[in-house]
Image (tube, rainbow, N blue to C red):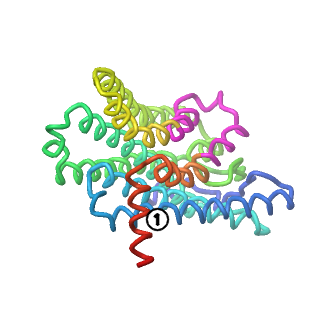
Amino acid sequence: MDKIKTNFTVTEFIFLGLSSDPKTRIILFVLFLFFYVLSVAGNIVIITIIQLEPRLQTPMYFFLTHLSFLDICYTSTNVPQMLSNMVGRKQTIPFSSCATQMYFSLSFGMIECMLLGVMAYDRYVAICRPLHYTVIMDQNTCLQLAAISWSSSFLSSMVINVLTLSLPYCGPNVLNHFFCEVPSVLRLACTDTSLTELVVFIFSIIIVFIPFLLIVVSYVRILHSVLRMQSASGRYKALSTCASHLTVVTLFYGTAIFMYMRPQSKSSRAGGKVIAVFYTVVTPMLNPLIYSLRNQDVKGALRRVLAKQRT
């Protein structure tokens, strides 16, 4: 750690944020505060419903609980800092706080990639191998898959952060972003960052692309099985259980691939901030809405829970 600290000459970073206009910043503050409250409240509702409803004590909703908790953690890592900067005079963050924010935001993003891949595998087993579902996706397997998702992501993020923080930062200290993210911090290093960028890209392949490949393979197999079903109602029921997950996958992976799966030198910084807003603020807010509006089980459970509260 002493060796790393000697490289630091920058003690804080200054965010450029999304806008320098005071009126625009106030509007964005109100909008993003609303999104943040809705995101946290919505995900808490999803977790509560799953815990209270015995019919939802299945592997699919076990992983959805993890996903909802993860969304709360992820958005809470970045959005409060962003909101504070929008109304504060100084849009700064200490180097140590920036490093912490960068570590956890990257960890939570990686965990979501892993969980979405695991959830796709769960749907594959449920639809393509229904007779073996309870044996394959038993409680121990679910706990192990969740533990692997969390631990491997935290470890991978630690490797990336150590490499990033080992670089010298001697100025400038202005981040063209609204929170600390590895690509934006790397641009301020006072040395060649090609090796670190290569490591980030490799981990992106492992953590982002491999779960994505699992999702694609799982849904190809699912589609093949569904097309072989002779019952139209059976096909509809099978596909309806996948609709919410596919929507979330499209939203999350569309932005993740755009941000991390191409060379940083070719990316648009302004466009990158817009995409970052989407997966930092908008997607965690939409996830509970998607799972509540498009999922018949969750809607039915919500009605039953509300009915119990009224009686």
The residue sitting at 53% across, 53% down in the picture is 289
Determine which quarter of the picture holds residue 299. Answer: bottom left
Q: Is residue 84 left or right of residue 78?
A: right
Q: Main secondary structure of the magenta part?
A: helix
- Residue interval drawn in magenta: 251-278
Q: Is residue 48 above or below residue 284?
A: below
Determine which quarter of the picture holds residue 133. Answer: top left
The residue sitting at 72% across, 52% down in the picture is 174
**Residue 243 at x, y = what percent?**
44, 38
* Dot 1 crowding, Cα within 10 Å, few <14, some 14–19, many 20+: some
Q: Quadrant of the N terminus?
A: bottom left
Q: Is residue 168 left or right of residue 132?
A: right
Query: Is residue 269 within the magenta segment?
Result: yes
Q: Is residue 209 above or below residue 122?
A: above
Query: Is residue 225 within the magenta segment?
Result: no
Determine which quarter of the picture holds residue 308. Answer: bottom left
Mark 1: amino acid: Val
The residue sitting at 40% across, 57% down in the picture is 300
**Residue 126 at x, y = what percent?**
25, 39
For this orientation, the residue located farthest to the bottom is: 311
Q: Quadrant of the C terminus?
A: bottom left
Q: Which residue is mark 1?
A: 45
**Residue 49 at x, y = what percent?**
39, 64
